[in-house]
Amino acid sequence: MDMGVVRDIEVNGKEVLVKITPTYSGCPAMDMIAADIKIALDKEGYQTKVELILSPAWTTDWITENGRQKLEEYGIAAPLTESADKLALTGESKLVKCTNCGSNNTTMVSQFGSTACKALFKCIDCLEPFDYFKCLK
């Protein structure tokens, strides 16, 4: 919910339809997210259907403030604004804060991190690597 992936929930008695949108069209996690939703609701006695919605496309604007905090706590830097994101990804500005020590003295190691929606950064101060969730519009 905090990531904005769950777009809608329709409940009709014990039947539940959950509509989800991937963070990008090739996101490999969507099958597991759909399965986890179905398993959790079915376990509570619901007959669950999960539907993948591709339009409108997901945007990082849909991440709640709580979601951004959870990303940071997990070790993934939350997305910046669109213009700041471009400056950070081109190396023009040090705007991505280290999730380990909080320093802005960071550098991008790779445009792509553990998934295509993230870039890999490294903190120059504490030397720890971390993912940055790219701003997607």
Image (cartoon, rainbow, N blue to C red):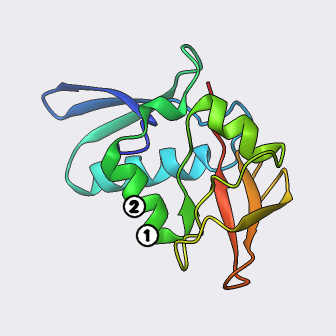
Q: CA distance from mark 2 to mark 1?
A: 5 Å
- Read off the residue under disc 2: 70
Q: Is residue 104 left or right of residue 46?
A: right
Q: Residue 79 at what x, y percent from top left?
A: 56, 45
Q: Are there few (<14), some (14-19), or many (20+) residues within 10 Å of tag 1?
A: few
The amino acid type, in three-letter code, at marker 1 is Glu
Between 76 and 54, the residue placed more toward the observer is 76
- Read off the residue under disc 1: 73
Q: Is residue 63 above or below residue 110?
A: above
Q: Is residue 51 above or below residue 32?
A: above
Q: Residue 85 at what x, y percent from top left?
A: 67, 39
Q: Secondary structure at mark 2?
A: helix
Number of marks in picture: 2
Q: Residue at x 38, y 50 (%)?
A: 67
Q: Quadrant of the C terminus?
A: top right
- Residue 114 appearing in the image: no
Between 24 and 73, the residue placed more toward the observer is 73
